[in-house]
Amino acid sequence: MDRKEFLAMFGVSAAALALTTCMNGCSKAQVTNTAPTVNFTLDLTKPTNSALQTNGGFLYVEGVIVARTNAGAFIAVSQTCTHQGANVVFQASASEFICPAHGSTFAPNGAVGMGPATVSLKSYYTSVSGNFLHVSG
Ligand code: FES
């Protein structure tokens, strides 16, 4: 193989690699079907769950973001943004989940408020009994 043949072959391979990388990394595809099925109980008195002792606090458990609204209600949705998979956070002042990656917003029930995400977050059932919060769905 002479130099010209090598460069021709390498050039094709590099172009194919760059195209493949961009197709994967530049994808605008929505992430779907990543929401877990869960069934867990949190002891709200434990230090590891202390974020939920204050209105506006939130934490992540088993792929779910569990939040306490400013009104003191507990809500839970899948933590993975349906746009490209970043973890959403709870913004108590607006009572919504937001994605820091590209700005999507989701209502407390997981419905899309603003894109680029177009698919809702999975919403979970929550119930409180004494100091225990049960989350399932
Ligand atoms: S990953 Fe893009 S808006 Fe969430």
Image (cartoon, helix red, strand yellow):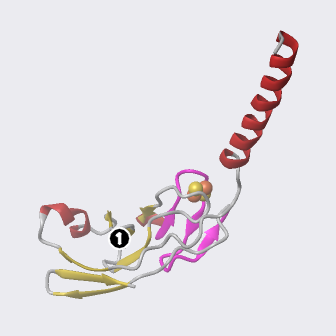
State the image coordinates of residue 109 (x, y, percent, origin top left): 49, 80
Q: Is 8 one of the magenta-colored residues?
A: no
* Callout 1 amino acid: Ala
State the image coordinates of residue 102 (x, y, percent, origin top left): 61, 52
For residue 110, above or below residue 25: below
Q: Give 34 or 7, whichever is nearer the viewer.
A: 7
Q: How many marks?
A: 1
SS under mark 1: strand
> Can residue 47 be seen by looking at this rendering?
yes
Identify the residue position indicated by label 1 in the image.
67
> Can residue 103 be seen by looking at this rendering?
no
Look at the image and give the residue range highlighted in magenta. Answer: 95-115
Q: Is 99 one of the magenta-colored residues?
A: yes
Q: Relative to residue 73, is residue 50 drawn left or right?
A: left
Q: Quadrant of ligand 1?
A: bottom right
Q: Residue at x 69, y 41 (%)?
A: 21
Quadrant where the C terminus lies? bottom left
Q: Residue furthest front?
A: 1
Quadrant where the N terminus lies? top right
Q: Residue at x 80, y 18 (%)?
A: 6
